Image: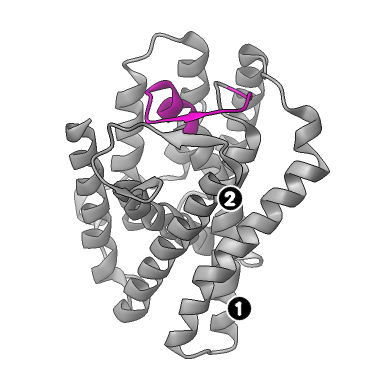
Amino acid sequence: MVGFQLVCLAIVALYVAVELPRQRDRARWLRRMGVITAGSWLAEDTCIRLYDFYGYAPEWSAFVDRVPLLIVLIWAPVVMSAWGLAQRMASRRVWLAGAAFVFADAWLIEPIAAASGLWRWHAPGLFGVPPIGVLGWAYFAGVAMAAFEWLDRRRAPGWADLAVVPVAALGSHALLLATWWGALRWVSFTVPEWPAVAVAWAASLGLTAWAWRHQGRVPMAQMTPRIPGAVLFFVLLAAHRSPPLVAWALAFAPPYLALTPWGAPARLLGRET
């Protein structure tokens, strides 16, 4: 567990080291990283306290109340990297595209993490993960991105970014409660694994064709910081001998592989254009 946490910390540090030099406004980027870090902790910690749908393994080294410190630090790279992809891929409603990327990331990470004992859900779902748990990732990311974009359109001063901390947390709670009481509490059951895998691969093939047509819109420098995190979870996946889980996780690779503009090593880093 200690080794896993050190790798996670190195991935966060690598993300900052690669992304920060590429930013035109580094102070704003760092400020928003901090805002997402604080907002994600507030949203997640209050969710655990209020709903008790899941809990983290006690083997994590340091906690900020109910949430491991490394989880708090990881949230910002997840959200910011997805937002960067969305800005390249979408011309309108970028926040919605960014939330969709986070939703996809969560469906890869959550089942592997739950199977590895990093955290445990107390509600049924797919591979031990209820859909409301994955939606929580997307809700927080979407609200935070939408709030930042709203501030940017109005050319708000930098200090206004701080308002995103409570806005993203409260928005996440509102959406989670509306989704749960409006729909998901009526369909809370264990999802058959192989049919879900078939659906995942059907979606994967369609998204791969779409990504292949749009290859080149995302520079390699944009994709590079996401690769170590993906590799880490596929390494965790190798420790499990569940054929449905392996088949499920592998379905997430083709769209990103098709979207990535594989090129010379010199293109791995670069300034924002």
Residue type, mark 1 in image: Trp
Mark found first going from the N terminus, 1 or 2: 2
Residue displayed at 31% across by 16% down: 239
Which image quarter: residue 119?
top left
Q: Secondary structure at mark 2?
A: helix
Mark 1 → mark 2, Cα distance in angstroms: 18 Å
Instruction: Examine the structure image and report whether residue 123 is included in the region drawn in magenta.
Output: yes
The label shown at residue 150 is: 1
- Quadrant where the C terminus is found in the figure: bottom left
Q: Nearer the viewer, residue 179 or 49?
A: 49
Above or below, 113 relative to 139 = above
Describe the colour scheme in one phrase. Answer: one colour
Above or below, 38 relative to 66 = below
Residue type, mark 2 in image: Ala
Label 2 CA crowd tier, 10 Å (few <14, some 14–19, many 20+): many
Residue position marked by numbered label 2 in the rendering: 138
